[in-house]
Amino acid sequence: MSDYAVTIGLEVHAQLLTNTKMFCGCKASYGAAHNSLTCPVCMGLPGALPMPNRRAIEMAVKVGLATGSTITRATKFDRKNYFYPDLPKGYQISQFDKPICAGGSMEIRGLFGVKRVGITRIHLEEDAGKSQHGDDDGTLIDLNRCGVPLIEIVSEPDMSSPEEAYAYLMEIRRLVRWLEVCDGNLEEGSLRCDANISVAPEGERGVPVEIKNLNSFHGVEKAIRYEIERQSEVVRNGGKISRMTLLWDSDKGETRVMRTKEAAHDYRYFPEPDLVELSISDQMMAEAHEASPEYPWVRRERYVGIGVKPDDADVLTAEKEFGEYFEEVFAGCNNEAPRAVRWVIGEALRWRKELGGGERFVVSAYATAEVAGLEASGKISGLAAKTVYEEMARTGRSDPAMIVKEKGLEQVSDTGALEAVITKIIEDNPKEVERYRGGDMKLKGFFVGQVMKAMGGKADPKATGEILGRLLG
Ligand SMILES: [Zn+2]
């Protein structure tokens, strides 16, 4: 889309799922009455002293380990000074020169292929409050979010297209959800993304322009595409890109200038005097290792190793929960991967999307495995199995064997009954029998279809095949 070299780096803020805030004991939760989750520490009252949240530090270490980052064993907090109404202290406690993690990377995949994106640093900081700009009442401030722990994940400018940026952001989202450190909700702001984009003729260095306010996944892609086009146009016309910060307006589908270089902030970072240096102990490192689940990319390779197709393995590792579900069904399918995949992707995930709003499975893994087992043993046909499954999905029932009985779906494998039906079909279709005996083997399917029709789809295919073969000679 551009004749020039494009470089994109992303800064992602992830709100950590701790019970309490970063430096005080206030609850870190949402939807409470305005300013009810506050105390002297997070309101920045004089004399109040911060105390770091151990859980938040552990979560940052877990993300660091997963991204192959180096954990800074002697880390520290710094003050980032700026004035804004939702920041009562007049500074944010963040990390400047010794971030808790540095030098990691993430692999991303897409139509562009497979690419590794460097992660410059991951640091811990506290969130600011929320301003609510009303029409009549002026601006209202809610400090409930003030002091909620965040990690900021800063990538290297290793991406070169909107698609890569999108894939990277999705990968970060999957990881923080997988590690249970953040719920990854971009629309609600628990995951936030800023992008740095530069466009320059091949071989030259560009000037990065920052875009803020990217609050949806497609917004990220669109805003980056828009900015690449804008900068390409400037470069094409012989102009110079100037350093600035832009805001993405998702309604208008365009960016507007938030501040230019002249007004750029100098945050006057200095070490937080109320907190001592933070050392990450061997014990904490060991605990973080221990608490880390099998990573999604490791699980994907394992699934491919047991016979799952790579594309299906991608689907099954999109969420940690999918894999746990799959493994239960897999065990119930005598470890036959293709069958388990068919049930999980074809049925369980489809019904999850259709009836569970994409948020929850409507049939348990146990019940799914049971239906798969009924089909595999020949007790019910593939078609009947789907009927049973739909009944469970729609009613919430989890007793497939009972549904089979109630609906009379059990396959007929009684050879006497099948023989009688097949004998009649052979009598009724002399022409087809003659052609079959004359060598037109394709007609076997015709006879199987006739048997299924006569038996209401409940004939055991294996027994049917055997008897047909014998009687047709
Ligand atoms: Zn507080």
Image: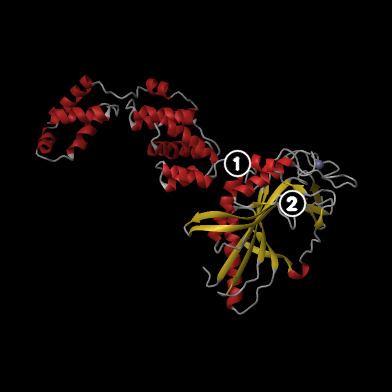
Give the numbered dot on residue 237. Answer: none
Circle 2: residue type: Thr
- Residue farthest front in this picture: 282
Question: Residue at point 42% right, 39% down?
Answer: 341
Element assignment for label 1: loop
Residue 446 picture quarter: top left
Question: Residue at point 28% right, 23% down?
Answer: 412
Residue 344 is left or right of residue 218, and the answer is left
Q: Position of residue 209 (x, y in %)?
A: 66, 66
Asked if the residue at tag 1 contacts the one at tag 2, i.e. Cβ–Cβ closer than 8 Å, the answer is no
Q: Position of residue 336 (x, y in %)?
A: 38, 36
Quadrant containing ligand 1: top right
* Mark 1 residue crowding within 10 angstroms, few (<14) / some (14–19) / many (20+): some
Residue 20 is left or right of residue 222, and the answer is right
Q: Which residue, given by chain and number where applicable, does mark 1 sit on? A: 292
Question: Residue at point 13% right, 28% down?
Answer: 427
Above/below status of 413 relative to 5: above
Specify which label sits upstream in the sequence, 2 or 1. Answer: 2
Residue 97 is left or right of residue 66, and the answer is right
Circle 1: residue type: Ser
Q: Which residue, given by chain and number where applicable, does mark 2 sit on? A: 75
Question: Residue at point 84% right, 41% down?
Answer: 39
Image quarter of the C terminus? top left
Can I make out residue 283 in this image? yes
Residue 390 picture quarter: top left
Cα distance between the residues tagged 2 and 1: 21 Å
